[in-house]
Amino acid sequence: MALAKMFYIFLAIFIACGLQLIVADDKIHTVSVAFDEETARYTFHDGYLQSGRIAEAEFQDLRLTYGLTFLTVSTNESYPDHVQAYAAGLAEGYITREITRQHWNNTIAGYCDMDSPSDYCKRLHNYLELNVNGFVNQAIIAHGGTDPYWHQVELFLTQVNGFQDGHENTPTVPTFLVRPFGALMFQISGDLEDLEVALNKTESERKRIFGSGSCSALIKLLPGNKELFVSQDTWNGYNSMLRIMKRYLFGYHMLAAPGSPLIPGNEMLFSSYPGYLFSGDDFYIVGSGLVVQETTIGNSNPDLNKYIQPENTVLEGIRNQVANRLATDGASWARIFQDYNSGTYNNEWMIVDYNKFTPGQAELSKGLLTVLEQLPGMIVWDDVTPILAKQTYWASYNSPYFPKIFNASGTQALVDKYGDWFTYDNTPRAKIFRRDHVKVTDIKSMQKLMRYNDFQNDPLSKCNCTPPYSAENAISARSDLNPANGTYPFSALGHRSHGGTDCKITSLALYKQFMMEVVSGPTHDDQKPFSWSTADFADSVPHEGHPDTFDFGPVQTNW
């Protein structure tokens, strides 16, 4: 009785303090999807189904151990592609129901209330109907049987519908017509930053904070070209920190016709989120030999918004998944991705082709590193391997590299007003990478650089602020550590729920094992760990299902 009484007293204190009791199950849970011929319905089966399995999903919740969950979804290539895609969505939606509900509540709930929609939400709904269920739908019907591009678009949207039906435990039939404000909202989270502007959402309600940095990326050659590391830190709001490391093994074909070959990128490993059927960060290891990542550069030129149209465009998350599946090298990835440019979620993409890298090679092979940048109405890409060979690293952050993109993006006006922070070469992260990339000798030192934030002591973190530095001015931001009563030239440098929320690294050695090393949560190498229980914004920032304290170490994904 005494123990029971103590438990309930503890539970009452726990709830009163606003803390969350998370029951994380570290067992591997498996669900299989089959088709019942008698009822003509898709059915769920716990565990691995020996025969008649179209798709299966394995899910492991290690939130309290690593701050991460892990998911594998695989399909049976003997079934038609659209059946595989729908079943893959069903399996993932079904097995991740609870964490998806939590992530929806943390990130999307209330964005658009269709019972009483705002004028902006009406415009967004109309845009998505015209784009996804209009132009894209018609293109699939017209070309999906003869064009691998549109076949893969169809499969992505079919998977979205499967996910929705799996989440709701209401299997129906495969279709590529989607609900604009259902599971599709997860897939367009990045696009919304630009759609909000193009569709005239009020400035005070927009998703993006002015000047907000997005992601740090580094590609580093070791001396003698003996190894090549690829790494990215996601920068995001802390409400986003429910994470799923995903591995997709899909038996998709180039076309639906019998005898069509399998797609090159039928296997993918990527960091992701509940409900996302792509990465969103984005960081992909693809079975074709490619590692693909990006950092967001944004668009500050309102004159370009005229190119954001529902006709003749495909939203960014769909395009990057199609490119991942069909590309065989950096150039083909860029050519596929540039088609039907939506002008939304404008990023700098880096495509590393490990097929073209041999440890110790005297000269780097052409096409080892391809870089692409996108704005509404334009895309520029090039093989930048000669630059990588010359300076032994390539770094990317939130400013365009290519002069044409930089000039068109409106970034020069921001440099004129706010200074070097908005430049490519002299922003704080550029200077830190230029100074410290030579310290990288192995995975451990690469991770140390990618998690680096010593903003109180590093002169490169200084700004015209009070106090005279910002935790945004680091490789892995910790804007929660900026004083709430400080003064800053623009809001992104101030105190807020935002920072580097992870670190992912791979190398040739890890790639050969189809692995990456991941650290979840804001950096705590040189700073105190982030805790919701001590954060002054905890009451206003949804974080259902999060661990309280993010003090996790690295883990290497190993399926």
Image: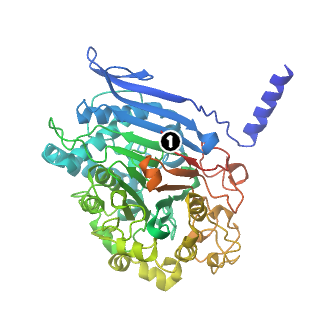
- Residue 417's spot in the image, x, y percent? 50, 84
- Residue 103's spot in the image, x, y percent? 52, 43
Which sits in the foreground, 328 or 115? Answer: 328
The image quadrant where one finds the N terminus is top right
Is any atom of residue 109 visible in this view?
yes
- Residue 170: which quarter of the image? top left
Which sits in the foreground, 462 or 249? Answer: 249
Q: Identify residue type, mark 1.
A: Asn
- Residue 367's spot in the image, x, y percent? 31, 66
- In the current view of this chain or complex, which residue is farthest to the bottom? 416
The vertical placement of 425 against 209, above or below, is below
The vertical placement of 265 against 449, above or below, is above
Which sits in the foreground, 333 or 213? Answer: 333
Q: Residue tagged by mark 1?
A: 558
The vertical placement of 235 against 493, above or below, is above
Is any atom of residue 545 visible in this view?
no
- Give left or right: position of 521 versus 38: right
- Residue 90's spot in the image, x, y percent? 37, 32
